[in-house]
Image: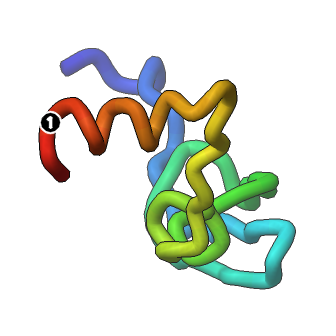
Protein backbone atom coordinates (compact mmCIF):
# COMPACT_ATOMS: atom_id res chain seq x y z
CA UNK A 1 0.00 0.00 0.00
CA UNK A 2 1.22 3.46 -0.85
CA UNK A 3 1.44 5.85 2.05
CA UNK A 4 -0.45 9.14 2.13
CA UNK A 5 -3.02 8.40 -0.59
CA UNK A 6 -5.75 6.78 1.50
CA UNK A 7 -8.41 8.85 3.31
CA UNK A 8 -8.67 8.80 7.09
CA UNK A 9 -11.15 6.17 8.34
CA UNK A 10 -12.51 7.56 11.61
CA UNK A 11 -15.50 7.46 13.96
CA UNK A 12 -18.63 8.90 12.38
CA UNK A 13 -22.23 9.62 13.37
CA UNK A 14 -25.17 9.15 11.03
CA UNK A 15 -28.17 11.26 12.08
CA UNK A 16 -31.66 10.71 10.65
CA UNK A 17 -34.39 13.34 10.37
CA UNK A 18 -36.42 11.36 12.96
CA UNK A 19 -33.62 11.82 15.51
CA UNK A 20 -32.07 8.35 15.36
CA UNK A 21 -28.27 8.43 15.67
CA UNK A 22 -26.09 5.58 14.44
CA UNK A 23 -22.41 5.45 15.36
CA UNK A 24 -20.09 3.83 12.84
CA UNK A 25 -16.82 4.43 11.01
CA UNK A 26 -16.50 6.34 7.75
CA UNK A 27 -14.31 8.71 5.79
CA UNK A 28 -16.84 11.48 6.53
CA UNK A 29 -17.20 12.85 10.06
CA UNK A 30 -20.96 13.46 10.24
CA UNK A 31 -23.65 12.24 7.84
CA UNK A 32 -27.27 13.45 7.79
CA UNK A 33 -29.97 11.31 6.14
CA UNK A 34 -33.69 11.85 5.61
CA UNK A 35 -34.90 8.32 6.38
CA UNK A 36 -33.52 5.32 8.27
CA UNK A 37 -34.62 1.77 9.10
CA UNK A 38 -36.41 2.99 12.25
CA UNK A 39 -38.73 5.39 10.42
CA UNK A 40 -38.97 3.81 6.95
CA UNK A 41 -42.52 2.46 6.40
CA UNK A 42 -41.33 -0.88 5.00
CA UNK A 43 -39.09 -1.71 7.97
CA UNK A 44 -41.31 -0.20 10.69
CA UNK A 45 -44.40 -2.18 9.59
CA UNK A 46 -46.49 0.93 8.90
CA UNK A 47 -46.51 0.40 5.14
CA UNK A 48 -49.88 0.69 3.48
CA UNK A 49 -50.71 -0.84 0.15
CA UNK A 50 -52.07 1.72 -2.24
CA UNK A 51 -54.83 -0.04 -4.11
CA UNK A 52 -55.49 1.50 -7.48
CA UNK A 53 -58.41 0.02 -9.38
CA UNK A 54 -58.78 -2.96 -7.02
CA UNK A 55 -55.54 -4.67 -8.08
CA UNK A 56 -54.71 -6.00 -4.62
CA UNK A 57 -58.15 -7.56 -4.17
CA UNK A 58 -58.08 -8.95 -7.71
CA UNK A 59 -54.71 -10.61 -6.99
CA UNK A 60 -55.91 -12.05 -3.68
CA UNK A 61 -59.08 -13.40 -5.30
CA UNK A 62 -57.20 -14.89 -8.23
CA UNK A 63 -54.52 -16.65 -6.16
CA UNK A 64 -56.59 -17.36 -3.04
CA UNK A 65 -54.50 -15.35 -0.64
* Circle 1 residue: 63
Q: Residue at x 52, y 66 (%)?
A: 37
Q: Residue at x 57, y 49 (%)?
A: 49
At which x and y percent is residue 8? 51, 44
Q: Report the front residue among 64 and 50.
A: 64
Horizontal side, residue 29 vs residue 38: left or right: right
Identity of the residue furthest to the right in this view: 17
> Relative to residue 38, is residue 63 depicted above or below?
above
For label 1, the crowd category at 10 Å Cα-Cα, with few meaning under 14, some 14 to 19 and many 20 or more, is: few
Identity of the residue furthest to the left in this view: 64
Horizontal side, residue 3 vs residue 46: left or right: left
Q: Report the front residue among 32 and 48.
A: 48
At which x and y percent is residue 11? 53, 69
Q: Residue at x 29, y 43 (%)?
A: 60
Q: How is the image coloured?
A: rainbow
Q: Report the front residue among 52 and 8.
A: 52
> Relative to residue 33, is residue 11 depicted above or below?
below
For the N terminus, the image quarter is top left
At which x and y percent is residue 32? 80, 56
> Relative to residue 50, is residue 14 depicted above or below?
below
At which x and y percent is residue 18? 81, 77
Dot 1: what SS? helix
- Total numbered labels: 1
Q: Report the front residue among 3 and 48.
A: 48
Q: Quadrant of residue 63?
A: top left
Amino acid sequence: MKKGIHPQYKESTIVCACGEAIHTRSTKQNIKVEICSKCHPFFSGKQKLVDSAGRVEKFRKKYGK
